[in-house]
Amino acid sequence: MRFSLRPVAISGFVSVALWISPTAAMDIEVSGYVEPEWRHFPNDGPTAEHESEFGSFAGELELAFYSQSGDHAFIIKPFGRWDAHDHERTHADLREAKYQYVNGDWEIIAGIDKVFWGVTEFQHLVDIINQTDNVESADGEQKLGQPMIRVSLAREWGTLTGFYLPYFRLRQFPDPITGRPTAGIKVRDEKAIFESDHERFNPDAALRYTHSLDVFDFGVSYFKGTARTPVLAFTAETYDGVSVVPRYDLITQAGLDVQATLGPWLLKFEGTRREQQNNWNTRATGGVEYTLYNFFDTGTDLGVVAEYMYDARGLASPQPLNDDFGLGLRWTANDTQSTAFLLGGIYDLETDSTALSLEAERRLGASFKAQLEVRIQETAGTGDTLANALIDEDMVRFRIAYYF
């Protein structure tokens, strides 16, 4: 079982809360969820050890302490999952463990937190603060908690936020022998290579400015520190045939995200300019989303999403989605059960690879929610290494969560 942060982080945080709390009355809120999960892989894995059925159990607890004045808040949010087959997926993490102070236009957050940047649907290029929780979900949406000090100033001219990030989180990968989805390659994260001599303790920093002007909402960001996405390098040492070592480079990245709201139309763009290993590179994602409200007088809404994803390195890029087109349909029932579906497809314009996905969710009563996820690598073209590695890793995932 993998624990991502030391227990001292929790004990120190609670000690601070107990020290400050006598100075003011505190309101306490407790919430969270528990969920069983079932995953099915219809195709055989790379080896006989790879199962087709996976069961796991996860839970998240949130403890929130708020001063009655509204100036102070303490939030602790631990998460954990137990997986019956993949020991790398059995892990625990502090998603949040933070102290928050608000004084007029100023906000200070210290501790562990999650931050999201971005507006596009198929990938989030500017979202760089938190490490991806890769064993939770392969789509990159789940994140690990990031230690930070964050200071924000909100004025009429916009919001300016500075970040100091003192500790780096390694990306986790499924076990190559029993875990799925997998290409059968062992990622030796215990042998991770860092460009920085400080390794995990490199002092990363970021700055972000956001504002709204008429129909436009935009953000401009700057990051300097260790890249969250590793470069996987082959080594002479093998593990059942193949192993790779993650290399984490130092990068400098500038980012821009813009969304324009024009009635039922949303125009979206994300772009980055990054320096890595003395090379500069440009990536961008842009597109539109159009919503048909009260679709055919049914009371439901249907949204159509179309985006293009670009990487100047083309097929030489270590990242997927370098010359790809994405199309999605988002349907919401607008009912008391919050029923929603999202159907998406990505087509690689260079290799003709095609990937499909379906996400659906519905509340069951007041406390339960069911979620279904389907991912299919429909075709894998010549030269598309990732698509060919995942051609037999189609997946169905079903969860029922109880919220309290």
Image: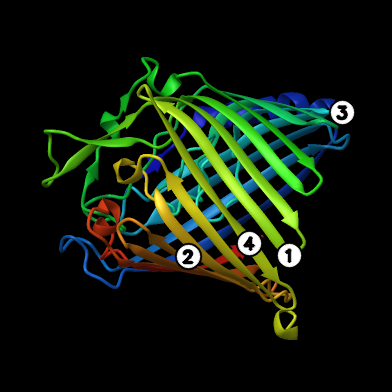
Residue 77's x, y, as percent?
A: 60, 43
Query: Which amino acid, mark 3?
Result: Gly
- Vertical placement of residue 317 versus 225, above or below: below
Between tags 2 and 3, which lies in front? 3
Is there CB contact under 8 Å for labels 3 and 4?
no
- Density class for disc 2 (Cα within 10 Å; few <14, some 14-19, many ≥20) is some
- In the picture, residue 247 is in which quadrant? top left
Task: Give how far across and how far down residue 141 sits, in percent.
Answer: 51, 51
Q: What element carries label 3?
A: loop
Q: Which amino acid does label 2 sit on?
A: Pro
| C-alpha span from label 4 to label 1 | 8 Å
Location of mark 3 (residue): 104
Please say if 368 is above or below 46: below
Q: In which quarter of the image is residue 335?
A: bottom right
Amino acid type, label 4: Glu
- Of callouts 2 and 3, the N-terminal one: 2
Which disc, if any, is residue 289?
Answer: 4
Residue that label 2 marks: 36
Report the residue marked by disc 1. Answer: 264
Label 1 or label 2, whichever lies nearer to me, is 1
Please give the label number shown on residue 3.
none
Measuring 27% from the left and 49% from the top, which residue is drawn there?
175
